[in-house]
Amino acid sequence: MSSESSSPVRSERSKPRVAVVFGGRSSEHAISVVTAGAVLRAIDRSRYDVLPIGITLDGRWALTADEPERMAIANRTLPSVEGIAEPGGGGVMLPVDPGRREVVYAEPGSVPKDLGEVDVVLPVLHGPYGEDGTLQGLLEMSGVPYVGAGVLSSAIGMDKEYMKRVFTSFGLAVGPYLVVRPREWAADRAGALARIEAFAGEHGWPVFVKPARAGSSMGISRVTGPEELAEAIEEARRHDPKVVVEAQLVGREIECGVLEFEDGPRASLPAEIPPVSSHAFYDFEAKYIDSAEGLVPAPLTEEQTAEVRRLAVEAFEAASCEGLVRADFFLLENGEFVINEINTMPGFTPISMFPRMWEATGVSYPELIDLLIQAALRRPTGLR
């Protein structure tokens, strides 16, 4: 479509246009769809025009119905982009010229349609191909502002190995871990298993075997002995060829949200994830299917609350984050906080801890989304 035909779209718009991008190619596809549904329900339509764009599991960018009720988990069934995509098999294309922000929709055998400009992207994708810096790099190349962490900090936040290396270099305490790389597992499986057994001999069983670059507790196994190791590694490798093995830390699970305000990042009141009696650990089903309840705010002393909020902001700054982060800690029996990980695009489902923590701190769900969009609109793309 010509630039003349698209100019009325620009001139008639009085509100910023937000593209909510969700779904994606990772194993966290369904949770991203649930998150998007919650965001679409809560975003202030009097302040923002909204364009929902879903990415299918095979990577197609699709126009989707703006119907949040179809994006929820229903009867233990997970939603998908394919289930709400507009018929016809068309695809959405972002601009590749940093001087233009028009989004185009093309169907096979049809003239592409100009959908108008997008002012900011709210990428509520979880996992690889969305939360790991890949989408952020695409948006930087396109010159389109977006909510959340940039390329480097998104990659750090996705990769549990390098996240721990960064935190260690900034003086934050992390638990014992080791990494099994794909070449090692392919060339010397017995040696890798022996190395993990030696690690467990030093730090004790059980250990946790995790995909290095996945979230929502996908692919994680609690391993109580050597006979379970190979199967646990293969399960983790279904999500990521690189695997992290962590020692079990005995302590309370404490989470804290960080949000970027005009004067800098601030931390929310923390939450506690209590042990779930029906689950060995806080896994995917405990989080999203059985709706395990967190305690908000966490029952901590004033000193502990202040300390974990301080550490959460330190983790945010250490990884050069922007926009938002959920920082997860263990509070050990000796009173020390050990950081487990950060999540640069935490879940925004109705039961997710990040919005619940901020609501307890005095920021409602719609206000939270507004703050994130405004921070993205203030921030330039490119080096900063």
Image (cartoon, rainbow, N blue to C red):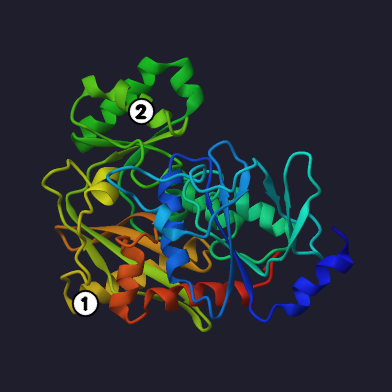
Question: Which residue is found at the position 46% from the left and 23% from the top?
Answer: 184
Give the x, y percent position of residue 85.
Answer: 55, 47
In this rendered view, identify the residue nearer to me: 80 or 127. Answer: 80
- Which is more N-terminal, label 1 or label 2? 2
Give the x, y percent position of residue 144.
Answer: 69, 64
Residue 198 makes an appearance in the image:
yes
Question: Looking at the picture, does residue 17 appear above or below residue 284?
Answer: below
Q: Answer left or right for 325 relative to 270.
A: right
Give the x, y percent position of residue 152.
Answer: 59, 55
Question: Looking at the picture, does residue 60 appear above or below residue 40?
Answer: above
Question: Looking at the picture, does residue 267 appear above or below residue 30?
Answer: below
Question: Which residue is found at the position 17% from the left and 71% from the top?
Answer: 300
Under mark 2, the amino acid is Glu
Distance, label 2 to label 1, CA atoms, is 40 Å
Question: Which residue is found at the position 49% from the left and 40% from the top?
Answer: 26
Image quadrant in which the N terminus is located: bottom right
The residue indicated by pointer 2 is 235
How dense is the environment of label 1, judged by Cα within 10 Å: few (below 14), some, or many (20 and up)?
few
The residue indicated by pointer 1 is 303
How many numbered marks does the figure carry?
A: 2
- Element type where label 1 sits in the image: helix
How dense is the environment of label 2, judged by Cα within 10 Å: few (below 14), some, or many (20 and up)?
some
Under mark 1, the amino acid is Glu
Of all residues, the one furthest to the left in this rendering is: 277
- In the rendered structure, are the residues bearing label 2 and label 1 in contact, judged by CB atoms less than 8 Å apart? no
Q: Answer left or right for 114 relative to 46.
A: right
